Image (cartoon, rainbow, N blue to C red):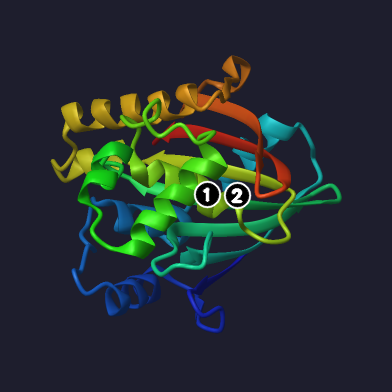
Amino acid sequence: MKYYFKNKDREIHKKEEWEKAFCDADSRNHWKEGRSAECLAEDFIGSNPQGEKTINDMLYRFIHSNNISLNKAEIEHESKFDSYKSPRMQDLAIWGKIDEQNFFIGIEAKVDEPFGSKTIAEQRNSLNHTDADKRLDELVKNYLNGNEVKYGTLRYQLLCYLAGSFCEENADIIFMPVIVYKSRSEKYNLYDTKKGEINEKAYKQFMDSLGFEPMEQIIGGQIAYAYHKKVSALGKEKDVYSCYIIK
């Protein structure tokens, strides 16, 4: 599988190139050994890459097909889900095919970083300009049955994660794996167990509250939670699969 950075014409061949591309684009410089950006790069094109194997295993468990192909990947991919600024940023996006169906994978890489700083209710209370209000209005209408009060305690970042992934064009099936790099971050004494537990709870609360069905038969090994739902939004219906992987 070939890796690209954002503009799709900058191919990444090794971890050092991934780091340079990431740091050039990230003014806050979130690159640090044992944190999510570095762990993701190490997992997919580092000294002993296992990321593609993990993704292939996930796909097979969900779909049970041997005809799976990973075609290309893009680091820091922008999933645009509406007409406003600031699209959903996928830590790593992968496109491919299962049998005759096209799929999109939007990977959210974590160590113990939270799913954003705000719940949906807190996001609403913090808004002070029209476009942000309109964006939240549309997200609530399209993905939360118009009921902002019922879902107010859910994480706003996870809602954007769902919307951005769902809106990827030419994708029949959507996968949303959260990959938590616990063991690598522990080597650098960077993993906070309490924060990790809060993240697990936030993820599970989001999936359960939106009516995603748990897929208990998928859970095992590195997969702690697995879910599926036929999501209907914007006049489309797509199978959406998600899982919480702890490595």
Q: Is residue 51 visible?
A: no
| Most distant residue in the right direction | 100
- Judge left or right: residue 216 versus residue 222: right
Q: Amino acid at mark 2?
A: Phe
**Residue 17 percent coordinates (x, y):** 39, 76
Residue furthest out toward the front: 130
Residue 247, placed above or below residue 171: above
Q: Quadrant of residue 15?
A: bottom left
Q: Are marks 2 and 1 in contact (CB under 8 Å)?
A: yes
Instruction: Estimate the x, y position of residue 99 in percent, counting from the top left.
Output: 84, 47
Task: Quarter of the image for the C terminus: give it.
Answer: top left
Neighbor class of circle 1 (other Cα within 10 Å; few <14, some 14-19, many 20+) is many
As measured in the structure, the alpha-carbon distance from the residue carrying label 2 to the one carrying label 1 is 5 Å
**Residue closest to the eye, 49 or 62:** 62
Say which residue appears at 42% left-offset and 57% top-offset.
Answer: 134
Q: Quadrant of the N terminus?
A: bottom right
Instruction: Examine the rendered structure and indicate whether residue 36 appears above or below residue 143.
Output: below
Would residue 186 be seen by someone viewing this image from the given angle?
A: yes
| Residue 216 in the image, given as x and y percentages of width and height | 57, 15
Residue found at x 81% / y 45%: 67
Q: Secondary structure at mark 2?
A: helix
Query: 10 Å neighbourhood of mark 2: few (<14), some, or many (≥20)?
Result: many
Q: Which residue is mark 2?
A: 166
Please tell me the numbered disc located at residue 163.
Answer: 1
Number of numbered discs on residues: 2
Q: Kindly give the residue lying farthest to the left in the view shown.
A: 189
Residue at x 60%, y 43% (from the top left corner): 175
Between 126 and 91, the one nearer to me in the picture: 126
Q: Residue at x 54, y 33 (%)?
A: 145
Give, as a three-letter code, the residue at label 1: Ala
